[in-house]
Image (cartoon, rainbow, N blue to C red):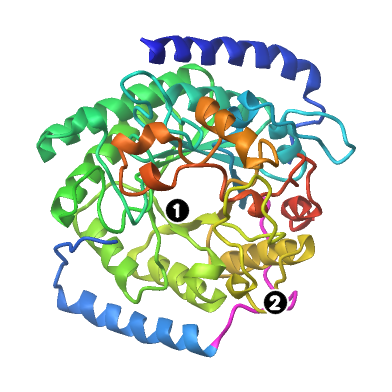
């Protein structure tokens, strides 16, 4: 089948890239429509939630996201300065070039490491291809792709966070489709399949020498996971996934933090309820990851109150799993951007390189002040494959460097199948449309000096 031949091609190209990158690694390794769920009704939990609702409402209305004065706590050296770079391999196939600050063509992972990034986040889909082996797009992030990216990140001196979506394509609040191979299966059967997939994928990655420091069991799972929406069924899936990660961690004697990822932190009490459910069910996890996009998710104070509440009430570590901000309102590839209007911008943070840099700095500072242990910037390397949409479309379809291809329509007909195309994130990257790093990329290293 074409899928098999493509996967062999990935391995072959990865081997070629490894040889090339050994020469061009020009730097030293440096320093996210909900369905109803069954909610728990514990009275003490509800009282705490009501209190949190009041706090969040007050912070959302009384405090806007404004530039912060430099009066924060120092950023610790072990604070995660992370980057989701899941689309890099598809960008490479599409002949995208990345340069360092000296204008030299480089492996982008070394550019990130030299700028102060110390952790790379990589999403993983089960089978992002149609029956003929055509990729769904969005990076075509199967296990083989994660291995290729993870090896490069490790070679550049960075740790890796594996973000399992447990879907064949995007998993987020709008959709949590089960992988094609799991459709029609009972919850218990899905639990077994999820554990098997997790164990196999992680074992293969670790066998390749990838330095995995954290694993996400699910992606933005507020309203379900792998086609399940009832909270009790979701908890079963999470229990299976977390146990699988813990088992692989022990087998390989690898210290791997287990994280569960939520979004919509501006919705009062929702995340607190979800974390409460995890703790009450004795799910074996270590940390909660939160998506925090300032233009969607409220003020810094709202974010800080959520981070603090999870730590104090539930005794779990917290990190920001996704954040971003635009450096321009221009479009680079002829496909509309997710943030494209000045109405989407936050007061005091213009869509400029400086505005982007200030926003990143303030997200990190506020997260650190609240006790979070790290921040991941989402898809800072996802730049245009070209400026003309007509010529780009063939590339997006062939290499998966757009957010979705037409081949995804059978799997996700109500969204990707209707709106497939290019990159909606190019104006929020940390490289310009030609692949040169922006000054805002330097903020990660500068905050630790």
Q: Residue at x 73, y 32 (%)?
A: 110
Q: Position of residue 127 (x, y in %)?
A: 35, 27
Q: Position of residue 361 (x, y in %)?
A: 69, 63
Q: Nearer the viewer, residue 240 or 414?
A: 414
Q: Residue at x 22, y 74 (%)?
A: 45
Of badges 2 and 1, the one in the foreground is 1
Question: Dot 2: what SS?
Answer: loop
Instruction: Determine which residue is flagged by label 1.
Output: 32
Pointer 1 local density, CA inside 10 Å: few below 14, some 14–19, many at least 20: many
Q: Nearer the viewer, residue 448 or 222?
A: 222
* Residue 437 belongs to magenta span: no
Q: What is the span of residues highlighted in magenta in the rendered image?
A: 63-77
Pointer 2 local density, CA inside 10 Å: few below 14, some 14–19, many at least 20: some
For the residues bearing labels 2 and 1, Cβ distance under 8 angstroms:
no
Badge 2 or badge 1: first in the primary sequence = 1
Residue 267 - label: none
Can residue 87 be seen here? The reply is: yes
Name the image quarter holding residue 362.
bottom right
Q: CA distance from mark 2 to mark 1?
A: 24 Å
Q: Residue at x 36, y 73 (%)?
A: 267
Residue 5 is left or right of residue 357, and the answer is: left
Name the image quarter holding residue 448.
bottom right
Q: Residue at x 22, y 52 (%)?
A: 282
Instruction: Determine which residue is flagged by label 2.
Output: 67
């Amino acid at each position: 089948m074409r899928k098999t031949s493509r996967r062999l091609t990935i391995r072959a190209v990865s081997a070629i890239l490894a040889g090339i990158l050994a020469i061009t690694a020009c730097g030293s390794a440096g320093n996210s429509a909900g369905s109803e769920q069954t909610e728990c009704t514990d009275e003490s939990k509800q009282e705490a939630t009501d209190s949190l609702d009041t706090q969040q409402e007050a912070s959302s209305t009384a405090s806007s996201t404004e530039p912060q004065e430099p009066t924060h706590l120092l950023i610790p050296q072990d604070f995660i300065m992370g980057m989701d770079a899941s689309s890099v391999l598809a960008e490479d196939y599409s002949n995208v070039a990345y340069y360092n600050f000296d204008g030299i063509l480089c492996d982008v992972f070394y550019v990130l490491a030299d700028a102060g990034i110390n952790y790379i986040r990589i999403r993983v889909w089960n089978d992002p291809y149609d029956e003929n082996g055509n990729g769904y797009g969005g990076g075509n992030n199967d296990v083989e792709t994660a291995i290729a990216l993870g090896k490069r990140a490790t070679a550049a001196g960075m740790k890796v966070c594996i973000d399992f979506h447990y879907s064949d394509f995007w998993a987020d609040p709008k959709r949590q489709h089960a992988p094609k191979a799991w459709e029609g299966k009972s919850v218990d059967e899905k639990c077994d399949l999820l554990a098997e997939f997790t164990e196999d994928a992680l074992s293969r990655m670790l066998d390749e020498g990838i330095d995995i420091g954290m694993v996400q069991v699910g992606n933005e799972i507020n309203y379900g996971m792998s086609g399940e929406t009832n909270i009790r069924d979701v908890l079963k899936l999470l229990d299976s996934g977390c146990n699988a990660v813990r088992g692989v961690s022990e087998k390989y004697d690898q210290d791997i933090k287990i994280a569960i990822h939520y979004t919509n932190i501006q919705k009062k009490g929702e995340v607190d309820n979800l974390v409460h459910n995890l703790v009450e069910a004795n799910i074996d996890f270590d940390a909660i990851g939160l998506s925090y996009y300032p233009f969607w998710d409220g003020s810094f104070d709202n974010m800080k109150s959520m981070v603090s509440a999870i730590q104090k009430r539930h005794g779990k570590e917290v990190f920001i799993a996704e954040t971003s901000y635009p450096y321009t309102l221009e479009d680079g590839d002829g496909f509309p951007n997710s943030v494209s209007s000045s109405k989407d911008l936050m007061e005091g943070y213009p869509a400029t390189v400086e505005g982007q840099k200030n926003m990143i700095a303030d997200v990190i500072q506020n997260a650190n002040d609240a006790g979070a242990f790290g921040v991941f910037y989402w898809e800072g390397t996802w730049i245009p494959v070209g400026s003309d949409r007509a010529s780009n479309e063939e590339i997006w379809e062939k290499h998966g460097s757009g957010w979705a291809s037409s081949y995804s329509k059978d799997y996700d007909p109500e969204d990707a199948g209707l709106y497939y195309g290019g990159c909606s994130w190019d104006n929020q990257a940390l490289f310009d449309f030609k692949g040169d790093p922006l000054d805002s990329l330097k903020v990660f290293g500068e905050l630790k000096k």
